[in-house]
Amino acid sequence: MNATTTTVDPAEIAKFSKLSETWWDPNGKMKPLHAINPLRLAYIRDAACRKFDRDPKKPGCLSGLRILDIGCGAGLLCEPLTRLGAQVVGVDPSATNIEVAKLHAATSSLTIDYRCTTIEEMPDDKFDIVLAMEVIEHVVSVGAFLDRCAALMKPDGLMLVSTLNRTWKSFALAIVGAEYVLRWLPRGTHEWDKFVTPSEVTHHLSRNKLMVTEQSGVIYNPLADKWSLSSDMDVNYMVIAEASI
């Protein structure tokens, strides 16, 4: 990939920039992200603690680990990861998202390295953990994006990816249901043809000599009003990858 190539879709950036002021409102347009955030955080924490031999129950269990959160928005994951002791770099190409993220971190007395940039413009730094959470379904080229993610991982690091599967079930639930019926998300938040199957993610990671070591579906129980892990990966799912031996 040359210096002028980018995986950023300007239309996607504009779309999420309009929501910047609502990122931290748990009852606003980002309510679904707030609802799923504790599950995402626990999944990341537990994966990191297994990999780096830490006790997830101890305060500061991620102390000393460098984490890159790509497409961080206004920092919904960056802040709790920082509270767990991690040194977090949050990257987002939306200037308004980063502005809101910096302001919220300051009011929370948290030190987070927020950068308004793209992954292609990131220096060749190395991180213990690279996060691509709910972002690959919004980029121009999933393969090129994950290539760059892999290049920023330490040899003994981890990558975590969460996204939406491209199935008729995901069309029915994640677009028709979430955007048009329940109105959890603004209409047009997602484009079904940009959803990514687990096999496609695995293919792109394997090209970078990364092996998927764990994968899990994420489902919503409307009766309990709760998100949980599941073997059902037809809609939302997360994967963990590390260097293949």
Image: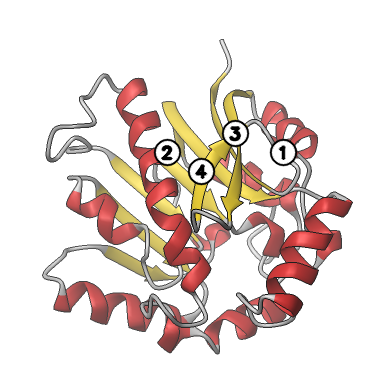
Disc 3 + disc 4, Cβ < 8 Å: no
Can you see residue 96?
no
Residue at label 1? 201
Residue 119 lies left or right of residue 208; in this view the side is: left
Mark 2 crowd level (few <14, some 14–19, many ≥20, 10 Å Cα): some
Amino acid under label 1? Answer: Val
Residue 228, placed above or below residue 164: above
Can you see residue 73?
yes
Q: Earlier in the sequence, mark 3 or mark 2?
A: 2
Measured as percent of width and height from the top left, residue 25 is found at: 38, 80
What residue appears at the point 16 percent right and 65 percent down from the top-left corner? 110
Q: CA distance from mark 2 to mark 1?
A: 18 Å
What residue appears at the point 12 percent right and 39 percent down from the top-left corner? 59
Extreme residue toward the front, this view = 223
Which of the two residues, 107 or 139, is positioned nearer the viewer here? 107
Residue at label 3? 216
Residue at label 4? 228
Amino acid under label 4? Answer: Ser
Secondary structure of the residue carrying tag 4 is strand
Q: CA distance from mark 3 to mark 2?
A: 10 Å
Q: In this figure, what is the number of numbered marks? A: 4
Give the number of the mark in front: 4 or 1: 4
Which of the two residues, 57 or 222, is positioned nearer the viewer here? 222
Residue at label 2? 43
Q: CA distance from mark 3 to mark 4?
A: 10 Å
Give the number of the mark in front: 2 or 4: 4
Secondary structure of the residue carrying tag 2 is helix
Q: Earlier in the sequence, mark 2 or mark 1?
A: 2
Q: Earlier in the sequence, mark 4 or mark 1?
A: 1
Mark 1 crowd level (few <14, some 14–19, many ≥20, 10 Å Cα): some
